[in-house]
Image (cartoon, rainbow, N blue to C red):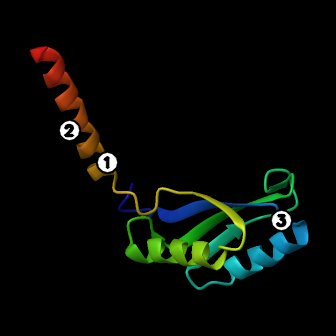
Amino acid sequence: MESEFETLGSAKVMIANISYDEALEVADEISARDDVQSLTFDNTTEHYNNASALYDVTFNYPESDDRCLTALNEIKSSLTEHDLYVSSTIGQDLSKTITDEMTVIIVIVAAGIYM
């Protein structure tokens, strides 16, 4: 399946304490970027609720591409004046995380056996 379909990088970007009009301006800025394939934001409670805007951003690059991480970091840098929260797996090396966690588990098990 991966050879037929490419999984593009994506992120959920939330800005708290923002008016809907300001949120629309931010949506326009993000979607106008060359490295953004699509942005989902509208006037539903799924994307704007209690003065918080949630944007679903899809990038033009696969999640593992460094350009995807660069694009996400540039978006975050451009929004530093806002209360910003980002949820994404872009830039996370899952194999390194698993290896690190397994090392901790092995140490705990070894300590438990010898005690």
* In the image: residue 36, left or right of residue 46: left
* In the image: residue 105, left or right of residue 69: left
Residue at position x 19%, y 23% in the image: 109
Q: Position of residue 112 (x, y in %)?
A: 18, 17
Check the image and name the residue furthest to the left.
114
Residue at position x 82%, y 61% in the image: 17
Q: Position of residue 73 (x, y in %)?
A: 52, 73
Q: Position of residue 99 (x, y in %)?
A: 23, 44
Amino acid type, residue under disc 1 in the picture: Thr
Q: Position of residue 45 (x, y in %)?
A: 85, 51
User: In the image, is residue 55 above or below residue 111?
Assistant: below
Depth check: 110 or 89 in front?
110
Question: Within the image, what quadrant is residue 79 found in?
Answer: bottom right
What numbered label is drawn on residue 25? none
Q: Earlier in the sequence, mark 1 or mark 2?
A: 1
User: In the image, is residue 32 above or below residue 42?
Assistant: below
Amino acid type, residue under disc 3 in the picture: Ile
User: In the image, is residue 97 above or below residue 12?
Assistant: above
Secondary element at image label 2: helix
Residue where numbered disc 3 is placed? 18
In the picture, which quadrant includes the N terminus? bottom left
Q: CA distance from mark 3 to mark 1?
A: 35 Å
- Mark 1 Cα-neighbour bin, 10 Å: few <14, some 14–19, many ≥20: few
Residue where numbered disc 2 is placed? 103
Camera-side mark, 3 or 1: 3
Contact (Cβ within 8 Å) of mark 1 with mark 2: no
- Mark 3 Cα-neighbour bin, 10 Å: few <14, some 14–19, many ≥20: some
Residue where numbered disc 1 is placed? 97
Residue at position x 46%, y 77% in the image: 70
